[in-house]
Amino acid sequence: MYTKTKDEINKLIKSSKLADDCFKYICKNIEIGMTEKQIAKKMDTYMLTHGATSLAFDTIVGSGPKSSQIHSKPGTRKIADGDIIQLDFGCIVDGYCSDTSRVLFINRVLPEYKKIYDIVLKAHSMCAKMTKPNMKASDVDLTAREYIKSFGYDFKHALGHGVGKEVHEAPIVSPKNTKEKIKNNVVFTIEPGIYIKGKFGIRIEDTVVMENGKVVSLNHTSKNITIIKC
Ligand SMILES: [Mn+2]
């Protein structure tokens, strides 16, 4: 069964809190000229020295055009003024995983970035609001997918997945999963994204729980546009 006990949810909250703290930390510690690898290393070290027993998965730091790759590996590209940086990260605390994604902008936000950011953010918030207990996972996915499609963009992956001891577990929140339902006490991710090939990508992800009839986020990092001045 993929619903979680109160004890499990508390552990997932702890793990998500550490990911949120890591985000706050990295926002204060990015400098122009740093590489993606250096940023990922700082994030990993932060989580591992503040209560994580391990990472939930390899941290993604994709800057500039690399943000358009859904699963990029941090490389040697250096952060520059006007950059966009996609972060996707999580850790394991008390045996339970966190998984969150945010986008950072260096000093300013180009209009084409803002346009896409606003669509992805709206897809996220709308989906969180419209998801009711016992909705089919496929229908949850479709709320965000249809919104993104209505602007002419493709949504290339599933909306989300269950999170627990494993970072990817049931229920997969995709158009194909018409069997499983988002019941009370199901913990899952909402992670809509738009990827403009070779240019940039934007994904916003929270781990959430269906609690007493509504979606409650386990992440508390703001989903508004984050501009790093450096
Ligand atoms: Mn995820």
Image (cartoon, helix red, strand yellow):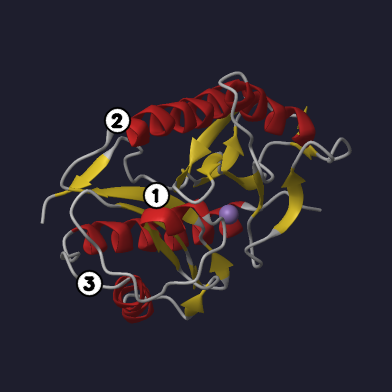
Q: Position of residue 128 (x, y in %)?
A: 55, 29
Task: Name the amino acid type tagged 2.
Answer: Pro
Q: Residues within 10 Å of mark 1 (few under 14, many from 20)?
A: many
Q: Which mark is residue 34?
A: 3
For mark 3, does the 10 Å Cα neighbourhood hold few (<14), some (14 to 19), or many (20 or more) residues? some
Residue type, label 3: Met
- Tell me if residue 213 can be seen: no
**Up/down of 23 relative to 37, above or below:** above
Q: Quadrant of residue 175?
A: top right
Apparent side of residue 169 relative to residue 58 in the rendered image (left or right): right
Residue extending farthest to the left is: 230
Q: Is residue 181 shown left or right of residue 185?
A: right
Q: Residue at x 76, y 36 (%)?
A: 137
> Quick one: label 1 or label 2, which is nearer the N terminus?
1
Q: Mark 2 highlights which residue?
A: 111
- Give yes or no for contact between labels 1 and 2 (Cβ–Cβ under 8 Å): no
* Point 53% across, 57% down: residue: 69
Q: 52 and 145: which one is in front?
A: 145
Q: Nearer the viewer, mark 3 or mark 2?
A: 2
Residue at x 43% of width, y 76% of height:
52
Does residue 158 appear in this view?
yes
Q: Secondary structure at mark 2?
A: helix
Pointer 1 residue: 102
The percent coordinates of residue 106 (x first, y second) are 21, 51
Question: Badge 2 local density, few (<14 within 10 Å), some, or many (20+)?
Answer: few
Q: Earlier in the sequence, mark 3 or mark 2?
A: 3
**Relative to residue 221, is residue 54 depicted above or below?**
below
Q: Amino acid at mark 1?
A: Arg
